[in-house]
Image (cartoon, rainbow, N blue to C red):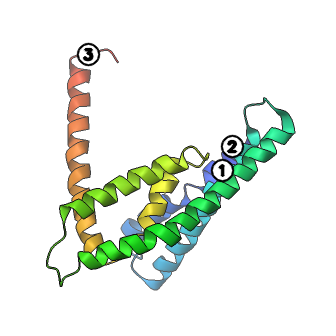
Amino acid sequence: MIINFRVREISRAFPVLARILAEYLKLLTTQVGETAMAAAAFNDVAAWILLALAVALAGNGNGGEHKRSLISIWVVVSGVAFVAFMLIVIRPAMKWIARRCSPEHDMVDEAYICLTMAGVMVSGLMTDPIAIHSISGAFGFGLTIPEGEFAEALMERMEDFVSACAGKIIGTFLVAMMLMIPA
């Protein structure tokens, strides 16, 4: 249990560091900021792996030591297989999609954006059964998207989607609170 708390504590470094470097120090786009963010990202990946192992090793108390060791081996092997799948299959597919949406083609097809969003969700769903948090799967898929015009169009669409959904969720919540609707 102590390992679980320590790993969760160190996994909070990345967003905190990003905010400090961006808002307070204005160093996010400098060489020092990029190096610090790369180190923090590596630290977060290691923390998520340790957290997955801690959860697998803790188990549910049934089955003894042998079952816990098999679960931890399952988590490691499945996690490595997921990363290999992302690098060998998904990354080239995303590069192909980015080339199809390049400036020469003069358009970013909505189907590719929807396919990418679906890929993010499916990646999250793939990592959940292997005892790795679903956010890690979505993050892994996001790392396969190459930089360029397609990535910029995707970020623009995501900003629209998030702002629209957040507004609707907050509005619904506020109306429910004002009308004292039970949960």
Crowd class of label 3 (few under 14; some 14 to 19; many from 20; radius 10 Å): few
In the image, is 121 to the left or to the right of 73? left
Disc 1 vs disc 2: Cβ atoms closer than 8 Å?
yes
Give the label on residue 55, or none.
2
Disc 1 vs disc 3: Cβ atoms closer than 8 Å?
no
Q: Which residue is mark 3?
A: 180
Q: Position of residue 118 (x, y in %)?
A: 34, 53
In the image, is 72 to the left or to the right of 66? left
Crowd class of label 2 (few under 14; some 14 to 19; many from 20; radius 10 Å): many
Q: Farthest left residue?
A: 106
Q: Residue at x 31, y 72 (%)?
A: 97
Q: Considering the numbered disc 1 on the image, is that residue within a helix, a strand or a loop?
A: helix
Q: Nearer the viewer, residue 49 or 95?
A: 95
Q: CA distance from mark 1 to mark 3?
A: 39 Å
Q: Position of residue 182 (x, y in %)?
A: 32, 14
Q: Which residue is mark 1?
A: 51
Q: Nearer the viewer, residue 139 or 41?
A: 139
The type of residue carrying mark 3 is: Met
For residue 57, above or below residue 28: above
The type of residue carrying mark 1 is: Leu
In the image, is 152 to the left or to the right of 71? left
The residue mark sitting in front, 2 or 3, is: 2
Q: Considering the numbered disc 3 on the image, is that residue within a helix, a strand or a loop?
A: loop
In the image, is 160 to the left or to the right of 121? left
Disc with the residue nearer the chain's start (2 vs 3): 2
Q: Position of residue 15 (x, y in %)?
A: 47, 59
